Structure formats: structure tokens, C-alpha cells
Image (cartoon, grey):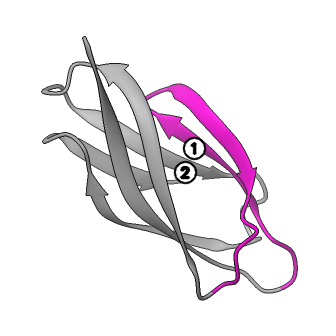
């Protein structure tokens, strides 16, 4: 196991109320946040994690109110085998 940092840009488009989302690394809850940025801005995430850098990992964004916003992840970096999911 080693520590490393996962970085990515999180885009969130919303209209009426800022959406609330949870951020997971694999199955571990890392944060629960309200997306308080303007819809045309980007959240630059830096997630410090502990794990096997060569294993397959997943960054997952879970919306707590599914119709409240539209999320996209871009520029995902930090380990060679990582994917993203929006649920």
C-alpha cells in the first residue's frame, strides 16, 4: 500500500438549487458536498488515498437528488488504472 493523490476536474451544471453529491474512492466515502460553484465553473478535486497504485480503482460521484444537476469528470489522473462513474 502507498499513498497517492487522485486529481480531476468536476463539472456540475444546475439551475435552481445547488446539488449535493458524495465522492467515493472505490467503496470508501471521501466527502459529501454541496456544489456551490456557478454552473460554468470547475471544481478541481485533489483526493489523497491509500492503496495499491497498480490496481484498478474507481472515482464515483453519487448525486443525492438525481434530478438536481448534471456532473462530468474530466482530466482524471493519479494512477494508471482508474475510471470514473456518475450515479
Q: Which residue is mark 1?
A: 23
- Callouts 2 and 1 close, C-beta under 8 Å: yes
Judge whether residue 14 is colored magenta.
no
Mark 2: which secondary structure?
strand
Judge whether residue 33 is colored magenta.
yes
Q: Mark 2 and mark 1: span between their CA atoms?
A: 5 Å
Mark 1: which secondary structure?
strand
Q: Which residue is mark 2?
A: 61
What is the quadrant of residue 78 in the picture? Answer: top left
What is the quadrant of residue 26 in the picture? Answer: top left
The one nearer the camera, 67 or 30, is: 30
Q: Which residues are magenta?
A: 16-39
**Dot 2, crowdedness within 10 Å: few (<14), some or many (≥20)?**
many
**Residue 84 percent across, percent down from the top left:** 36, 52
User: Which residue occupies the extreme right position in the image?
Assistant: 16
**Dot 1, crowdedness within 10 Å: few (<14), some or many (≥20)?**
many
Q: Residue at x 38, y 58 (%)?
A: 8
Amino acid at each position: 500500500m502507498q499513498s497517492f493523490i487522485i486529481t480531476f476536474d468536476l463539472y456540475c451544471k444546475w439551475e435552481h438549487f445547488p446539488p449535493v453529491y458524495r465522492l467515493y474512492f472505490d467503496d470508501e466515502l471521501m466527502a459529501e458536498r454541496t456544489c456551490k460553484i456557478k454552473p460554468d465553473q470547475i471544481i478541481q478535486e485533489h483526493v489523497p488515498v491509500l492503496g495499491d497504485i497498480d490496481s484498478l480503482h474507481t472515482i464515483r460521484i453519487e448525486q443525492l437528488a438525481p434530478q438536481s444537476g448534471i456532473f462530468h469528470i474530466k482530466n482524471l489522473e493519479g494512477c494508471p488504472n482508474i475510471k470514473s462513474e456518475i450515479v
